[in-house]
Image (cartoon, helix red, strand yellow):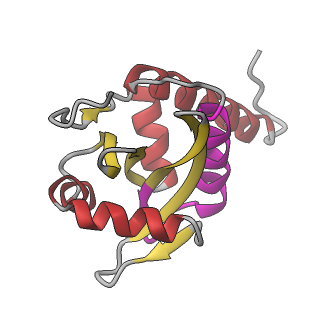
Amino acid sequence: MLDVDAKPERIKLDRFSRNILRVLGGRSLAIIEFSDELGPIIKYYYNRRSKFISKLLDNSAFVVELAIVGKHAKELILKDGTRVLLREFLIPINGRLGSNYIVVEISPNANTSILQAVFDELSRMISNYKKFDPSLINKILKKILLVKEKNKINSYPHIRIS
């Protein structure tokens, strides 16, 4: 049973993940989880100072709207110009698969193709867990970013990581 008074938990990204995410153009992220009692809710978030995350945390109708859009879109631009990536992942809930979402605010000059690949992989990997928490999200995201960064560096012939 879901605790209806539970507050969204902050995702504490390690320094490496924060820096790489920022360089790629990721500003903030949230995990929208489907609750049988409440519908779509913000379960976890990163970067409370973001206007986008503040709006998600303060406006449950906005969360529902994003969850609806997430069924049909992977990227959108809000009326205020905010660019958002959405990635669905399925988790077993009461004997069925429930739709949950990773929502990522990106900057206007973001490296969209790499961020899409990162969050496609994160959604795929999170789907393998029945339960997860901010620490696991940080661990998985760091692993993905390390691989992406190593591949980028290895694409330069004069630099090698052993």
State yes or no: residue 116 in magenta. yes
Viewer-proximal residue, 24 or 57? 57
Residue 118 percent coordinates (x, y)? 62, 45
- Would residue 107 be seen by someone viewing this image from the given angle? no
| Quarter holding residue 51 | bottom left
Q: Residue at x 46, y 56 (%)?
A: 25
Viewer-proximal residue, 105 or 111? 105
Residue 80 percent coordinates (x, y)? 28, 81
Residue 18 percent coordinates (x, y)? 40, 36
Q: Residue at x 61, y 40 (%)?
A: 96
As drawn, is 43 to the left or to the right of 112?
A: left
- Could you tell me what secondary structure mostly forms the magenta stretch? helix
As drawn, is 156 to the left or to the right of 78?
A: right
Q: Vertically, is 78 above or below 150? A: below
The span shown in magenta is: 104-127
Q: Residue at x 58, y 52 (%)?
A: 88
Viewer-proximal residue, 141 or 148? 141
Q: Residue at x 46, y 26 (%)?
A: 138
Residue 116 percent coordinates (x, y)? 63, 56
Q: Vertically, is 80 above or below 6? A: below
Picture quarter with the C terminus: top right
In the image, farthest residue toward the right: 157
As drawn, is 48 to the left or to the right of 146?
A: left
Picture quarter with the N terminus: top left
| Quarter holding residue 73 | bottom right
- Would residue 39 be seen by someone viewing this image from the given angle? yes
